[in-house]
Image (cartoon, rainbow, N blue to C red):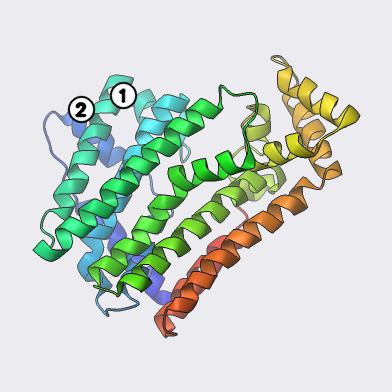
Amino acid sequence: MSSVKSMLTTIEQEIKKQRFGSSPQSLYDPIHYIMALGGKRLRPLLAMLSYSLYKTDPKKIVKYATAVEVFHNFTLLHDDIMDKAPLRRGKPTVHEKWNVNTAILSGDVMQVKVYDQFLDLDGKLLKPVLTSFNKCAAEVCEGQQWDMEFEMLPKVTEQQYIEMIKLKTAVLLGFSLELGALLAKAPTRERKALKEFGINIGIGFQLKDDLLDVYADQAKFGKQVGGDIIANKKTYLLIKAQEKATGDDKKELEAWLALRKFNKPQKVKAIKALYNKLNIQQTTEQRIQSYFEKGFKQLDKLEDSSQKKNLIAFTRNLINRQS
């Protein structure tokens, strides 16, 4: 996995040297702040890993790979405003550290700067890259809107939920892999396979996050276990519990969901007990596995190589995480 470490170092170096603008300082400081908060840098890594399936110089595309990271952080900045989130990666969110209006404008500039990073692409690549990016960017916004609308609904179907997380989270992973393949001028069939691989593992990752929120080891998780339960968040686990619960179980679940004042640890314990009774953990694990398998099947369309093994090993390592 040394090549992954090398790519990560290259990505961090590129992010540190990026200059978005200087004046007014209050507009640009929040951008440098959120970009410096870290994270897994998963999206630019996937772009470079995808590119390396076909070319030996992944550093050549780091500027375009990090453009995806800028877009991702722009969405986080605006999501935090919508969610009224006080923290991002353990530090105050931009709208808390500065103010909401500044956070909106800084996010807007980040979106513009993404296009700046793509502008010097080869003429034959510019249109297909921007066409694919624009489709993905609109879908991410659609997913966020659905997520907010779901908060107002008493129930959401499994199909609706999967479509929402596909748009909000998974399509950007799909685009990251597609971008690397596009920049390497890979065959259309393989570009599509890599995109589908990214979308399916992206859905699997989000379902895994839902599961970890309830069943993770608190010491490893890095955030409050049971936070989704406390917030009545419509996760895959809650949706399946609402489908499966009958009789007294259904009454108990609905009673907890209706309460506005409650003991948080008590609610988490009670809902988790219901999940255990209804085999929700096993149901979710099976669904997660089905998406990962569906994703890896797409890679069968690519020739075997050490770089392909690297991509598979990197993805499996992410799948096995506990936080």
Left or right for 260, reference 142 = right
Residue 242 falls in which quadrant of the image? top right
Q: Is residue 24 above or below residue 310?
A: above
Q: Residue at x 44, y 62 (%)?
A: 196
Q: Residue at x 17, y 54 (%)?
A: 118
Point out residue 1 in the picture as x, y percentages from the top left corner: 45, 75
Q: Which residue is mark 1?
A: 98
Q: Is residue 52 above or below residue 282?
A: below
Point out residue 312 in the picture as x, y percentages from the top left corner: 50, 73
Residue 75 falls in which quadrant of the image? top left
Identity of the amino acid at label 1? Trp
Residue 199, label in figure: none
Q: Residue at x 42, y 30 (%)?
A: 80
Answer whether residue 101 is visible to the viewer in this image: yes
> Which one is nearer the viewer's eye here, 285 or 109?
285
Identity of the amino acid at label 2? Ser
Q: Secondary structure at mark 1?
A: loop
> Which one is nearer the viewer's eye here, 58 or 201?
201
Q: Residue at x 17, y 63 (%)?
A: 125
Point out residue 38 in the picture as x, y percentages from the top left corner: 39, 49
Pointers 1 and 2 in contact (C-beta within 8 Å): yes
Q: Is residue 31 above or below residue 117?
A: above
Left or right for 296, reference 46 = right
User: Distance from label 1 to label 2 (Cα)?
Assistant: 8 Å
Q: Is residue 62 above or below residue 308?
A: above
Left or right for 220, reference 283 = left
Q: Which residue is mark 2?
A: 26
